Image (tube, rainbow, N blue to C red):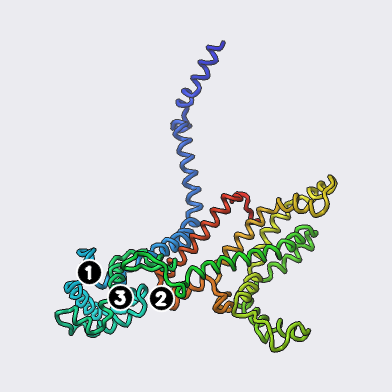
């Protein structure tokens, strides 16, 4: 009997291989074709969303990362000098180098790209744009020896720092923008060194941004937790009505909310007038709450508070009240039941809210630009400055890449310490 059963079981796969559909197609091939068709149909369904994500998210980030290391403003317009740098990687500039420089200055001036060349070098050595533009206007009249001729125009043409910057810019791809974003500079003799303390801009601003964002996230948690708890424990009818007040800021323009805080917090504003009228502060000692970190923190806390309340509420609403009642019935007091039973179940909402508010705060620039002043500006304001005013897009891209890297690092740390699977947004 065992031999018969074994023979029957062994022959079952073989019989499956011989089964066919009504049109004579082998059953196994038909099943594989059906599975392939289902996968193709599923891909076609998500293809529009995938294309949208690639075009609006992946491609811009990729372009930003490429722009942070690529700038051909110098290398594309100074071919003779670029060739000399390639052929003489360790040689000090000689007469042939100055001849190549003079020829390229004349070509760039004729092609009207001398401003682009000067701007590129000005990123590394400030004040050199005018040096290039003025030399470009007279480069066509220069005669050998070109070194003496260029030095006669301006002694700066003999500066080692200038030649070091031109050598670095002769490559279309360079890490110099990241070096500058880290408040470092390339010294011809010592290599990469720190800039003087009074010239450090980006790293102090970066750490200020992180600190202010963490403070805003903490304040939003302290204010949002009791509000979310109240909404989660009230009857649904009352809770839905109060939820309208939480969502109301989303129906108001961000610019309107920011300017409203400007009216409230300025020296002659409503808050100071109330404090003066109650005698809390003297009229000549009004509190300065605008154009500093205080204004930035207050305005951004108000704007980002709903982003903390909603994740907390969505998690708290699912916590059965019987858990806390059971803890009380077993002898725990109100505080112990709340802290050891209720709060641990809200950790997914706390993590989601803190992470969301922190990331949004790091990237804000409209509100800090309006109410922050010089001490309330954030890292994103410097990125916007390079994008819109200095037009140094490579520097803006390098700063943005550093900010993106910091956010990804925090995201990774959160996943390692708490677990991203425990985070719930709703």
> Distance from label 1 to label 2 (Cα)?
32 Å
Judging by the rendered image, the residue that carries numbered circle 1 is 92
Among the two numbered marks 1 and 2 on one chain, the one whose residue lies closer to the N terminus: 1
Let me know if residue 100 appears in the view.
yes
Among the two numbered marks 3 and 2 on one chain, the one whose residue lies closer to the N terminus: 3
Dot 2 falls on a residue whose secondary structure is loop
Using a 10 Å C-alpha cutoff, classify the residue at mark 2 as few (fewer than 14 neighbours), some (14 to 19) or many (20 or more): few
Q: Which mark is residue 345?
A: none
Among the two numbered marks 3 and 1 on one chain, the one whose residue lies closer to the N terminus: 1
> Distance from label 3 to label 1 (Cα)?
21 Å
Query: In the rendered view, does 127 fall on the left or right side of 409?
Result: left
Q: Are marks 3 and 2 in contact (CB under 8 Å)?
A: no
Judging by the rendered image, the residue that carries numbered circle 2 is 391
Residue under the point 69% across and 86% down: 285
Query: In the rendered view, does 413 fall on the left or right side of 275?
Result: left
Q: Place residue 358 in its image quadrant.
A: bottom right
The nearer-to-camera label among 3 and 1 is: 1
**Horizontal and vertical percent for residue 300?**
62, 71
Instruction: Say which of 90 and 249 sits in front.
Output: 90
> Distance from label 3 to label 2 (Cα)?
14 Å
The nearer-to-camera label among 1 and 2 is: 1
Q: Assign the C terminus to one quadrant of the image.
A: bottom right
Judging by the rendered image, the residue that carries numbered circle 3 is 117
Q: Are marks 1 and 2 in contact (CB under 8 Å)?
A: no
Dot 3 falls on a residue whose secondary structure is helix
**Horizontal and vertical percent for residue 126?**
37, 77
Residue at far front of view: 190
């Amino acid at each position: 009997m065992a031999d018969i059963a074994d023979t029957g079981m062994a022959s079952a796969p073989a019989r499956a291989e011989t089964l066919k559909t009504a049109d004579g197609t082998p059953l196994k091939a038909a099943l594989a074709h059906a599975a392939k068709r289902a996968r193709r149909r599923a891909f076609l369904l998500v293809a529009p969303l995938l294309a949208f994500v690639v075009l609006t998210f992946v491609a811009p980030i990729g372009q930003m990362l490429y722009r942070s290391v690529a700038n051909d403003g110098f290398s594309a317009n100074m071919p003779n000098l670029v060739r000399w740098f390639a052929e003489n990687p360790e040689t000090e500039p000689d007469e042939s180098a100055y001849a190549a420089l003079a020829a390229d200055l004349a070509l760039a001036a004729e092609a009207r790209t001398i401003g682009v060349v000067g701007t590129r070098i000005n990123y590394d050595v400030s004040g050199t744009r005018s040096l290039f533009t003025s030399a470009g206007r007279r480069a066509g009249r220069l005669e050998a020896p070109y070194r003496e001729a260029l030095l006669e125009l301006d002694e700066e043409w003999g500066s080692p720092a200038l030649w070091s910057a031109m050598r670095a810019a002769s490559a279309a791809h360079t890490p110099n923008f990241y070096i500058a974003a880290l408040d470092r500079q390339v010294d011809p003799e010592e290599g990469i060194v720190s800039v003087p303390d009074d010239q450090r801009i980006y790293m102090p601003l970066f750490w200020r941004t992180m600190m202010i964002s963490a403070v805003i996230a903490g304040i939003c948690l302290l204010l949002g937790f009791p509000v979310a708890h109240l909404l989660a424990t009230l009857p649904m009818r009352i809770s839905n009505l109060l939820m309208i007040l939480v969502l109301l800021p989303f129906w108001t323009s961000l610019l309107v909310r920011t300017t409203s805080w400007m009216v409230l917090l300025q020296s002659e504003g409503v808050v100071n007038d109330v404090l003066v009228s109650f005698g809390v502060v003297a009229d000549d000692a009004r509190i300065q709450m605008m154009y500093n970190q205080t204004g930035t923190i207050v305005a951004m806390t108000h704007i980002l508070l709903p982003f903390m309340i909603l994740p907390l509420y969505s998690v708290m609403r699912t916590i059965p009240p019987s858990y806390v009642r059971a803890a009380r019935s077993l002898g725990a007091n109100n505080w112990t039941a709340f802290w050891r039973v209720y709060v641990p179940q809200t950790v997914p909402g706390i993590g989601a809210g803190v992470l969301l508010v922190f990331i949004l705060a790091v990237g804000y620039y409209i509100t800090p630009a309006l109410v922050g002043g010089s001490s309330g500006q954030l890292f994103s304001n410097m990125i916007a400055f390079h994008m819109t005013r200095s037009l140094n897009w490579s520097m803006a891209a390098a700063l943005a890449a550093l900010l993106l890297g910091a956010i990804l690092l925090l995201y990774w740390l959160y996943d390692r310490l708490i677990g991203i699977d425990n985070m719930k947004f709703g």
